[in-house]
């Protein structure tokens, strides 16, 4: 799911849902969070314009009449946001491809997931096709069921359940999958390691990851962790999904995404509308954000802080009458010794009530953070994961090897570009998977079957075209 | 082969192009998009043209050409580079021992040629000079035809490089450059007049 943060009067709202068995809850939850976040942002930007209606249809109507200046602005900011997404998507894909090429564990067949029970080692092609269709059908049904379950949970406000689900998934990824990954990397490079050091490393990695993702942390660290868990998840898929099933699942999930986001009764659309009605905040986990997430929390907390402040002010009024006499005596901790020290260091500077009032009258810094340039763009981790699955599968199984991988990579980036551009044009919720995955699949099969044999012959004779 | 071969060939083939990328494309997000997606964005850029387009048609030509060149170069070289990291001896069956090196040089010249062809072709389209477009296609065919001589590297590499320099000069002139500016830039001075848009 992609979102362009609503820094323009028109709202660019891209959505996507990625669901898959192990983490689909996290991702769909993530989707709901994203939508909630996006809607809360929209609301914040709405209020100055006194629009309280959260219906997307009204947006599109306003959007039609806009200045060309705004369009150019849209283009510039759109371009910047596209670039902000290129880097993490590229990084995730690079990590996955590098792992696939070096660690043989992820290309070795060690069984299949329980969600894809039918084997692809069959005698006839027809049987194999049938099995892969059945596998894909089962997987997608699981995803649909889980999405609906999530919508139901969200509608009935079972936030604790969702939150717990999310935490368990993150724990699984950050500790268990990364332990396996690290073990395989050590095996590949024949690095000797003892359990104590390993335990320390995994413990630190996991705990810092949980803190960064679910609570607060430096932005870059959070982004890095999100990219890492996306890569880990993609690697799991690449390992455990048999070939034809994987391609089919990619295709079907793009279609499902299209349907779920654009149809009026689609589960994701219902999630969006529910979140809009409630004007709720998002969990920061499982959404890649290119700017500080705490901006959202800050803005969200302001109304609460104001409420608290107003509550406490009534208490203060009562206390004030008692404390007024002591006001002059209360130096707030700046006792005479402190003042002596200050005087000796920097000279007799002291703020007066007038200077304090002047400083407090300045516009607060939190307004500056709403500068459009600061607003980032958010992309769901499911997008990262499925893009990486496509490119990873291409690099693992293609006969064309690097040509096919490169072609798929460029195809996905072009799809991402186009999706964000369509968002800027249509300004309504659009799924981000279909275009990229379609391009990726087309390029994979075309390059592998048509371009690669040709390029092989050309390279053999050293002909250049 | 060795890591030295790998790095050497990749830098020969992609070094100048990546340098061009780094210095002219990476700063501007729009240029990066056009590098990757090429003409796909052209429509929208034209849409927002209000006398002050965010990116000039020449920049777009340059970046699009560079993008095409990088992709063509990558497709030619990348499997070679991957094989260069593995075991083997070049030319053990009697083929030329300079295979990797000449491939790298040929790739470099193709990348440059694509960049200049992009500029020329866009200019031809803009000013309705069909003969420029024909010339671009014709030189492309010539360069590809030259590679038929390929174990005879003198026959393919040297004419290609000469053609590349000629195309470079033509593209430079069309973009509004003049010899004085070139000399000044070589001497490290600022050029006094900014380049005029191509006539």
Image (cartoon, rainbow, N blue to C red):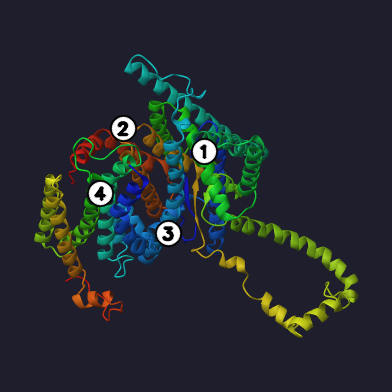
Give the labeled residue for mark 4.
B101
Give the Cα distance between marks 3 and 2.
36 Å
- Count numbered badges in the picture: 4
Are the residues under marks 3 and 1 on the same chain? yes
Q: Splitting the image into 4 quarters, where does residue A194 fall? A: top right
Question: Which of the two discs, 3 and 1, sits closer to the camera?
Answer: 1
Q: Are marks 3 and 1 in contact (CB under 8 Å)?
A: no
Question: Could you tell whether A133 is left or right of B40 in the image?
Answer: right
Q: In the shown orientation, is residue B78 left or right of residue A7?
A: left
Q: Are marks 4 and 3 in contact (CB under 8 Å)?
A: no
> Which residue occupies 37% across, 67% down?
A69
Residue matched to label 2 = A399
Tell me the residue at 16%/60% (across/down).
B125
Whole-angstrom CA distance, mark 3 to mark 1, is 28 Å
Q: Badge 3 is on which residue?
A: A80
- Marks 1,2: beta carbons within 8 A: no
């Amino acid at each position: 799911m992609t979102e362009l943060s609503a820094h323009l009067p028109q709202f660019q709202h891209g959505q996507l849902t990625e669901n898959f068995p192990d983490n689909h809850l996290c991702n769909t939850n993530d989707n709901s969070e994203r939508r909630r976040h996006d809607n809360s942002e929209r609301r914040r930007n709405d209020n100055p314009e006194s629009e309280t209606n959260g219906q997307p249809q009204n947006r599109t109507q306003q959007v039609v009449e806009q200045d060309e200046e705004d369009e150019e602005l849209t283009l510039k900011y759109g371009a910047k946001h596209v670039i902000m997404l290129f880097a993490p998507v590229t990084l995730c894909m690079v990590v996955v491809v590098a792992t696939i090429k070096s660690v043989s564990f992820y290309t070795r067949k060690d069984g299949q997931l329980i969600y894809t029970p039918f084997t692809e080692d069959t005698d006839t092609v027809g049987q194999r096709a049938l099995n892969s269709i059945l596998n894909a059908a089962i997987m997608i049904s699981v995803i649909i069921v889980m999405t609906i379950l999530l919508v139901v949970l969200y509608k009935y406000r079972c936030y604790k359940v969702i939150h717990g689900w999310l935490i368990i998934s993150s724990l699984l990824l950050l500790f268990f999958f990364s332990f396996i990954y690290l073990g395989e990397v050590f095996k590949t490079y024949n690095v000797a390691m003892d359990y104590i050091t390993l335990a320390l490393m995994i413990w630190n990695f996991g705990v810092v990851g949980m803190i960064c993702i679910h609570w607060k942390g430096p932005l870059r660290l959070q982004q890095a962790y999100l990219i890492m868990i996306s890569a880990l998840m993609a690697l799991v898929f690449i390992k455990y999904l048999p070939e034809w099933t994987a391609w089919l699942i990619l295709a079907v999930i793009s279609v499902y995404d299209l349907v779920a986001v654009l149809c009026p009764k689609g589960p994701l659309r219902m999630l969006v509308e529910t979140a809009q009605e409630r004007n709720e905040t998002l969990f920061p986990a499982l959404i890649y954000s290119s700017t500080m997430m705490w901006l959202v929390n800050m803005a969200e907390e302001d109304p609460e802080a104001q409420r608290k402040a107003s509550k406490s002010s009534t208490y203060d009024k009562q206390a004030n009458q008692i404390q007024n006499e002591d006001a002059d005596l209360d130096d707030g901790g700046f006792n005479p010794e402190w003042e002596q020290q200050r005087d000796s260091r920097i000279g007799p500077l002291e703020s007066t009530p007038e200077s304090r009032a002047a400083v407090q009258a300045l516009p607060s810094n939190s307004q500056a953070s709403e500068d459009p340039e600061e607003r980032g763009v958010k992309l769901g981790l499911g997008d990262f994961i499925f893009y990486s699955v496509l490119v990873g599968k291409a690099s693992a199984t293609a006969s064309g090897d690097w040509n096919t991988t490169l072609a798929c990579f460029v195809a996905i980036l072009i799809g991402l570009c186009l999706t964000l551009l369509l968002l800027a044009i249509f300004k309504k919720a659009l799924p981000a998977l279909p275009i990229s995955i379609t391009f990726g699949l087309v390029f994979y099969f075309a390059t592998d079957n048509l371009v690669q044999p040709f390029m092989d012959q050309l390279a053999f004779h050293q002909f250049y075209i | 082969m060795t890591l030295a071969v790998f790095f050497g060939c990749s830098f020969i083939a992609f070094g100048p192009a990546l340098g061009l990328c780094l210095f002219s494309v990476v700063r501007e997000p729009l240029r990066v998009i056009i590098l990757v997606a090429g003409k796909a964005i052209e429509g929208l850029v034209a849409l927002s043209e209000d006398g002050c387009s965010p990116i000039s048609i020449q920049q777009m030509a340059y970046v699009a050409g560079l993008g095409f060149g990088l992709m063509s170069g990558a497709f030619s070289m990348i499997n070679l580079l991957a094989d260069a990291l593995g075991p083997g001896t070049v030319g053990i069956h009697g083929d030329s021992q300079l295979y990797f090196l000449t491939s790298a040089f040929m790739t470099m010249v193709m990348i440059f040629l694509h960049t200049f062809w992009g500029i020329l072709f866009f200019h031809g389209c803009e000013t309705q000079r069909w003969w420029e477009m024909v010339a671009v296609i014709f030189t492309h065919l010539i360069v590809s035809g030259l590679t038929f001589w390929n174990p005879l590297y003198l026959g393919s590499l040297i004419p290609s490089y000469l053609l590349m320099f000629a195309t470079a000069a033509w593209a430079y002139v069309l973009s509004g450059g003049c010899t004085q500016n070139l000399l000044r830039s070589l001497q490290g001075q600022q050029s006094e007049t900014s380049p005029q848009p191509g006539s």
